Image (cartoon, rainbow, N blue to C red):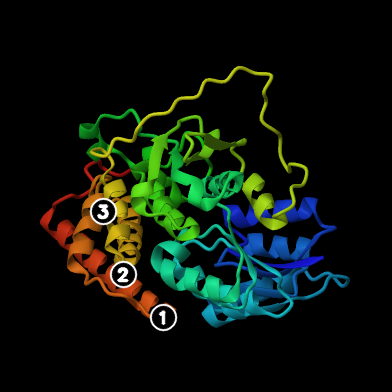
Amino acid sequence: MRNLTILGSTGSIGASTLDVVRRRSDRYRVFALVAGQNVDLLAAQIAEFQPEVVVVATEEARRNLLDRLDGHADAHARRPEVFAGPKARVQAATDPKVDFVMSAIVGVAGLEATYEAVKLGKQIGLANKEVLVASGKLVMDAAGEAGTEIIPVDSEHNGAHQCLKAGRRDEVSRLILTASGGPFRNTPKEKLAQVTPEQALKHPTWKMGKRITIDSATLMNKGFEVIEACWLFGFAPKDIDIVVHPQSSVHALVEYADGSVIAQISVTDMRMPIQYALTYPERLTAPVRRYDWSASHAWEFHPPDWGKFPLLRLAYAAQEAGGSATCTLNAADEIGVESFLNGEIGFTAIAELAEETLAKTPNRTPASVGEVLEIDRESRAVAKAIARSWSRSGRRVYPVARA
């Protein structure tokens, strides 16, 4: 029986992880649930999975959760210890009882807890992009020193992890990550400035959180995946290609020196890579339906439109620049997405905001997670100031009247 801490239990990855645990209760036990402020869903998760420890983001959320638990007390249910704040997140991830940490908190909020778990050699299921985008060198150096096994959960990196088992690393020529192309794959570039948040949130393939859905629409998500892949698998940016594959059936491809290309294919359900991460190196019966080979399938592959999606170029450039550039890019993008969803800037201004923030934020080499978090705060402040100045001047403001 393996004990799990789930960082981000009420998010989509966290909920899918718990569904896999539900199906494999003979193998896995939830030690800790770590969430934000969704106490209603968290209370239901506590009732079902009976964790020893629960952590929420704020003291207010902690009080609300305790009130909720008191109001639905079960005399036969074990009452978990309930904590709040960043230090409690770290403790939940590093407790001696924990064998596996699912890192699925969105944003840098999950960085410190994941990093400390890596330092202790806990097995990590990595679904939080920001961990490596913001602090790739620190995290991977710590993993190397501790012998920590980091299994990627993102479908593309999970697919690459599987494809790379087909040969030696020195036999690999390049890695190819697939992208759905998002909802604006066929939208002319000149029309993107008029895109609304409602349109951008309609992803054609995946059901995800708001930020990652917008990042998929701008292809920033794919840029972040390139950065992650560089750290996870030791690739230079020039050795990673992106191909638009609207059907989202092929998740990653690895080309070997002899010209052979190995592809990983599965249905679009995150429970597949989650179970792979939990059970690796074993392969258990699929937790979802399998790919239907009795039906006809047509797959398309296209090069991305670099001119229409400039955030891709910024991601490659930031990784090449090194230092804190990728941390700043992530922070600026998050502020840009938030501003877009709030109707404060237009869709195409997300990339403009990221580029200007990179230009105005000094690039340096952080020596600790604390320094990374400080750079993140500084970058966010720069991005917010730029967005406010645009709003005051009327430049790059969301062009469609909000309902």
Residue 78 in the image, given as x and y percentages of width and height? 82, 73
Q: How far apart are marks 3 and 2 (CA)?
A: 30 Å
Q: Mark 3 points at which residue?
A: 344
Residue with the most extreme top position: 296
Q: Nearer the viewer, residue 267 or 183?
A: 267
* Tag count: 3
Q: Hey, what amino acid is under mark 3?
A: Glu
- Specify which label sits upstream in the sequence, 3 or 2: 2
Dot 1 or dot 2, earlier in sequence: 2
Give x and y (percent) for residue 246: 45, 30
Disc 1 marks which residue?
368
Measured in 3D between alpha carbons, the distance from the residue under mark 1 to the one under mark 2, in whole angstroms, is 12 Å
Say which residue appears at 74% left-offset and 74% top-offset.
Answer: 70
Give the label on residue 323, or none: 2
Disc 3, disc 1: CB below 8 Å?
Answer: no
In this view, 158 is above or below 27: above
| Residue in the image at 55% along x and 36% along y | 263
Horizontal side of 394 relative to 229 (left or right) equals left
Q: Give the distance between the C-alpha atoms of the residues marked 3 and 1, in whole angstroms.
A: 34 Å
Q: Where is residue 316 in the image (x, y as percent from the top left)?
A: 31, 52
Q: Which of these two is toward me, 226 or 108?
A: 226
Q: What residue type is labelled 2?
A: Gly
Local secondary structure at mark 3: loop
Q: Which sits in the foreground, 36 or 311?
A: 311
Q: Determine whether 292 is above or below 81 in the image.
A: above
Question: What is the three-letter code of the residue carrying label 1?
Answer: Ser
Q: Earlier in the sequence, mark 3 or mark 1?
A: 3
On the image, which quarter does residue 369 sit in? bottom left
Residue at (44% x, 36% y) in the render: 180
